[in-house]
Amino acid sequence: HPPLGKLVIAAFIYVLGDSSGVWRLASFFCGLILICVIYALARALTGSFRLALVTAFLFAIDGMNLTQSRIAMFNKPMALAMFLSLLAITPYLMGQDPKRSRSFFASGFFLGMAVSFKWVAAPIAPLIFVFLGLRFFREKEKLRFLVDFIAFFVLLPLLLLIIFSLKNAGLTPSLTIS
């Protein structure tokens, strides 16, 4: 696995102590927050309060969500980062947010975080790229769009992965548990 998941769990252990309950806290909190993010994404996509609420409720009671939110795995933090990436780019894709750089930065940042948790998050990128490709043809400043795309969806995620990998390799100051 990429290093971020281990670093997050280590940070919880550093702050709260080494116990099996503490190991699980990152997944638990990410699972709770993910329910809210699913609601926000469904609301942004449909505009319907009721549909978003039903979507969040169904996700909250799903057995896989409940199980993975209780164990010390990197799936929940990765899923949270993936859905935050989608949520960040949605207003831009739907034409509701003219601030392309802000949406690209946030989405690329969370994409980089997701891939820094687990490699299996990488397939979310082509989904985002397809939608961005469709939006590209409506852009007036195509060169600026490409520059933003490369900066925020290629370089930023790579930079995050490199930073967390250096941290994991011991090339930066580390947390010590005593």
Image (cartoon, rainbow, N blue to C red):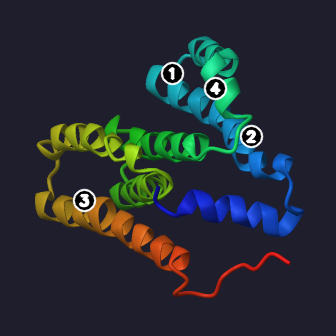
Residue 59 image offset from top left, x and y in percent: 61, 20
Asked whether 172 or 105 is in front, the reply is 172
Q: In the figure, residue 37 lies in which quadrant?
A: top right
Q: Secondary structure at mark 4?
A: helix
Could you say which disc has been placed on residue 47 in the image?
Answer: 1
Disc 4/disc 2 C-alpha distance (Å): 10 Å
Residue 173 image offset from top left, x and y in percent: 63, 87
Query: How many C-alpha atoms fall within 10 Å of the one at disc 2: few (<14), some, or many (≥20)?
Result: many
Instruction: Check the picture and name the quadrant holding the C terminus.
Output: bottom right
Label 3–label 4 contact, CB within 8 A? no
**Marked residue nearer the N-terminal end (1 or 2):** 2
**Marked residue nearer the N-terminal end (1 or 4):** 1
Could you say which disc has been placed on residue 65 in the image?
Answer: 4
**Marked residue nearer the N-terminal end (1 or 3):** 1
Q: Is residue 25 left or right of residue 5?
A: right
Q: Secondary structure at mark 1?
A: loop
- Residue at point 46%, 60% (across, down): 2
Residue 31 image offset from top left, x and y in percent: 68, 36
Query: How many C-alpha atoms fall within 10 Å of the one at disc 3: few (<14), some, or many (≥20)?
Result: many
**Amino acid type of the residue that numbered disc 4 sits on in the rendered structure:** Asn
**Amino acid type of the residue that numbered disc 3 sits on in the rendered structure:** Phe
Disc 3/disc 4 C-alpha distance (Å): 32 Å
The residue singled out by tag 2 in the image is 28
Q: Secondary structure at mark 2?
A: helix
The residue singled out by tag 3 in the image is 149
